């Protein structure tokens, strides 16, 4: 970004020299650039912002705007010297009396364009507020520099001009001025023709405004563009009840594919078996694929999107599991993958089975829509569960405490944290758990005993029974309602905004009592889209009021 900033300054200098046609006159606005940038950095420091991509982008954009104020001062001073033959000091004094109001008006209008961005709520506001503050600070400081520093530079650096003398009367500049004046005359004639047919052009202007509104309302929307972040994830989910060993076999198969077919693009693969984006279980895994540096990958076939597309075709052939390769969100922390993220809610309290039926119906409808792809439930399906029923009366009669029963179950079948210990300078945790052969089968629970209040050992079979049932590994609630998370992506060529509209229409086809709420990055997209029209309207209103005040001031001065 520093290179881009320097390139922007160089280009601005060349363009100014082309039109001002005087090195001293060009130097004055150029001096204003580092002064304004230094002040802008001070403003960023005061607000607690850092120098990042957004703030640097704002500065690059501001460079072309902040020199305008200084150019207005320089050109007006040179005009007065050429027309009236005054010295640079006298011409500067007279010039500032003429254009101070215009400079302030320019700053107010430009600030009115960018200030509304600071009032966006949510993540959008957090992202673009620093952009808005950076560019508005640069605009305000450029006006102050144009009213304080630039006049002093004009009075000291500019050389006097004789009355009627102009720059660029010889060589290349003479030819350039001739061509420019010729085009300016054509433009003036075109404007004159428009003014003679004002009614016709007013109608055309109104039609253009209508076309702008029409296209704005129908253009597809999205929160942030997809980005190759140098990594992506692959989620693995086997049928309910699958063992960890079965999951490991699928993970090894996927790992082999990446290191065989994508060896020119893949740097490393890291897998976590037993946990995934939708929950924890023996039948799920999540893999993090780190890509080589962008300079080492082909610009077309080596992008993360191209790799994901090829991997998706290969993973569709894996029958043992559902394997999804997906890009991470453009902003870390806003969801687990790119695309849309929603919660299907049970507003009527119809129950878990009805919610699962509605979920399956929604996924079936989404699968039939060509504008949607990889729409799926981001969670674990209902699976067989071993239910342990404790007869509290029998346990009490045998002198066994319920807390001791729970502790034994947790330690044997789950695990219990004991303490930490130091091993070669590193802290390691100690957990206690039953050995695998003693917790693999339902009947293994009868191998465990609980100490009663008399010190005797009582087997679980004396007060507990077991049975199989089907249930959800995780019950979700969102905003107080039972819910399931649905994620998906838009098909190639379709925006996320369009995909979200389609999902809303599909939810309306479900039985009464079911609704949706957007979450993660999709929520931020809907939030920013709802705020934009009002903020744009306020911006236009403030611009109009500033221009009207500036016009009224000029008319009053006459």
Image (cartoon, rainbow, N blue to C red):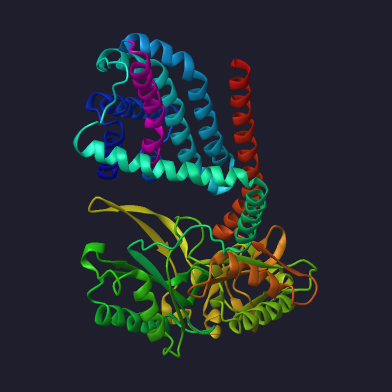
Does residue 380 appear left or right of residue 501 in this picture? left
Residue 67 belongs to magenta span:
yes
Quadrant containing the N terminus in the rendered view: top left
- Work out whether residue 32 or residue 41 is closer to the camera in this orientation and state it: 32
Residue 513 found in image quarter = bottom right
What residue sits 34% from the left and 11% below the top?
86
What residue sits 42% from the left and 67% below the top?
327
Residue 398 found in image quarter = bottom right
Can residue 425 be seen by looking at this rendering?
yes
Could you tell me residue 368's position as x and y percent?
Answer: 61, 84
- Work out whether residue 80 or residue 227 is closer to the camera in this orientation and state it: 80
- Helix, strand or loop: magenta stretch: helix
Which region is colored magenta? Answer: 60-86
Q: In this view, does 539 lie above or below 453?
A: above
Q: In this view, does 249 lie above or below 453?
A: below
Could you tell me residue 184's position as x and y percent?
Answer: 41, 41
């Amino acid at each position: 970004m520093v290179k881009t900033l320097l390139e922007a300054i160089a280009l601005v200098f060349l363009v100014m020299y082309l039109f001002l046609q005087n090195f001293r006159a060009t130097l004055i606005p150029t001096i204003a650039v580092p002064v304004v940038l230094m002040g802008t950095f001070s403003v960023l420091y005061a607000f607690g912002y850092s120098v990042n991509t957004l703030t640097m982008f704002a500065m690059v954009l501001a460079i072309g705007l902040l020199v305008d104020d200084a150019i207005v001062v320089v050109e007006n001073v040179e005009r007065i010297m050429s027309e009236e033959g005054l010295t640079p000091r006298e011409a500067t004094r007279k010039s500032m009396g003429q254009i101070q109001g215009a400079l302030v008006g320019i700053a107010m209008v430009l600030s009115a364009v960018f200030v509304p961005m600071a009032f966006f709520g949510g993540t959008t506001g957090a992202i673009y507020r620093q952009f808005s503050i950076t560019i508005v600070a640069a605009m305000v400081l450029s006006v102050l520099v144009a009213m304080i520093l630039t006049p002093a530079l004009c009075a000291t650096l500019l050389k006097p001009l004789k009355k009627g003398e102009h720059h660029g009367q010889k060589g290349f500049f003479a030819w350039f001025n001739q061509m420019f004046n010729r085009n300016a005359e054509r433009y003036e004639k075109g404007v004159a023709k428009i003014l003679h047919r004002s009614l016709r052009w007013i109608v055309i202007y109104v039609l253009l405004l209508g076309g702008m509104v029409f296209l704005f309302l129908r253009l597809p929307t999205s929160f942030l563009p997809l980005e190759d972040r140098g990594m992506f994830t692959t989620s693995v989910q086997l049928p309910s009840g699958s063992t960890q060993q079965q999951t490991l076999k699928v993970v090894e198969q996927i790992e082999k594919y990446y290191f065989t077919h994508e060896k020119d693009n893949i740097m490393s693969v890291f897998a976590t078996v037993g946990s995934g984006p939708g929950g924890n279980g023996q039948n799920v895994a999540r893999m993090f694929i780190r890509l080589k540096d962008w300079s080492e990958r082909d610009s077309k076939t080596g992008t993360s999107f191209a790799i994901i597309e090829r991997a998706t075709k290969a993973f569709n052939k894996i029958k043992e599991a559902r394997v999804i390769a997906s890009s991470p969100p453009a902003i870390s922390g806003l969801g687990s993958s790119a695309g849309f993220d929603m919660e299907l809610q049970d507003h009527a309290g119809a129950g878990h089975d009805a919610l699962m039926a509605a979920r399956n119906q929604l996924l079936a409808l989404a699968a039939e829509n060509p504008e949607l792809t990889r729409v799926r439930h981001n969670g674990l399906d209902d699976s067989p569960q071993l239910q342990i029923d404790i007869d509290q009366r029998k346990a009490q009669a045998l002198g066994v405490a319920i807390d001791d029963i729970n502790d034994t179950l947790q330690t044997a079948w789950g695990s219990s944290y004991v303490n930490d210990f130091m091993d070669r300078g590193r802290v390691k945790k100690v957990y206690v758990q039953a050995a695998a052969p003693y917790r693999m089968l339902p009947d293994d629970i009868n191998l465990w005993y609980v100490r009663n209040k008399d010190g005797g050992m009582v087997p679980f079979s004396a007060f507990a029974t077991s049975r199989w049932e089907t249930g959800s590994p995780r019950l979700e609630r969102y905003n107080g309602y039972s819910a399931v998370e649905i994620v998906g992506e838009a098909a190639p060529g379709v925006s996320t905004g369009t995909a979200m509209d389609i999902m809303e229409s599909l939810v309306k086809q479900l039985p009464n009592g079911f609704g949706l709420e957007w979450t993660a990055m999709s929520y931020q997209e809907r939030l920013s889209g709802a705020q934009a029209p009002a903020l744009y309207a306020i911006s236009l209103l403030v611009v109009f009021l500033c221009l009207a005040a500036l016009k009224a001031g000029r008319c009053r001065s006459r």
